[in-house]
Amino acid sequence: MRSPGGATSFITMKPMRLILAPLALLALALPAAAEKIPLSTISAYLNRLSTAEADFTQVNADGSMSTGRLFIKRPGRVRFEYAPPERSLVMAGGGQVAIFDAKSNQPPEQYPLSRTPLSLILAQNIDLGRARTVVGHREDRNTTRVVAQDPAHPEYGTIEMVFTANPVALRQWVITDDAGSQTTVILGEMSQGGNLPASLFSIQSEAARRAR
């Protein structure tokens, strides 16, 4: 089952093939100088990220783009609502990822969240200082880029997170899967601390609603 517009989801799985956005698209309006943000500071920021909402832009393998609204509820829950004309949905809850294709009447395609690098920032406790978790940490054009992997399963791929400082904020991520395919998600201004109901992340509830 394809995700929106024949492209793939934020998480990257084998049917999904996305590439990095052009540098002009990824450029952020940033201060003139910045220092690399420590991993301990980034870990603390991610652990405080209990709930969040943001608009997002996804860059697809063919150069096309999808947009939508993102909802996060840590640990382990995320929802990507794709805007028209796609109207598809990708969500994670109960340890599973589900892809709902708006053009299909079939049940959602599902696979374990633990097999995706995004699970690293949805975990209950995030410790980027753990051995072999971070494989890249650098300052780049006034942002801090952190490349992380599951130290027990590096074959699952990596997630490169891009942060700005003062205050620390997650701006985008790039996921590279085991085949080398990449997904880029660019975040709009993030709203944190809202009350997101558990039903928003229930795969069973969403499947039942769509079956009616």
Image (cartoon, grey):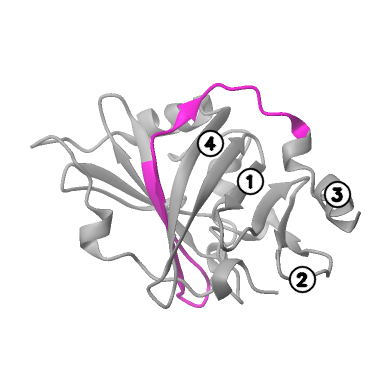
Q: Earlier in the sequence, mark 3 or mark 2?
A: 2
Q: Earlier in the sequence, mark 3 or mark 4?
A: 4
Segment colored magenta: 171-198
Mark 2 vs mark 4, foreground winner is 2
The three-letter code of the residue at mark 3 reads Arg
Mark 3 vs mark 4, foreground winner is 3
Viewer-closest of 151 and 43: 43
Q: Earlier in the sequence, mark 4 or mark 1?
A: 1
What's the CA distance linking mark 2 and mark 1? 19 Å
Q: Using a 10 Å C-alpha cutoff, classify the residue at mark 1 as few (fewer than 14 neighbours), some (14 to 19) or many (20 or more).
A: many
Q: Is residue 175 magenta?
A: yes
Q: Which residue is mark 4?
A: 126
Q: Using a 10 Å C-alpha cutoff, classify the residue at mark 2 as few (fewer than 14 neighbours), some (14 to 19) or many (20 or more).
A: few
The three-letter code of the residue at mark 1 reads Arg
Q: Which residue is mark 2?
A: 104
Mark 2 vs mark 1, foreground winner is 2
What's the CA distance linking mark 3 and mark 2? 14 Å
Residue 63 position, x and y percent, is 37, 73
Q: Pointers 4 and 1 in contact (CB under 8 A)?
A: no
Viewer-closest of 162 and 82: 82
Q: Which residue is mark 1?
A: 79
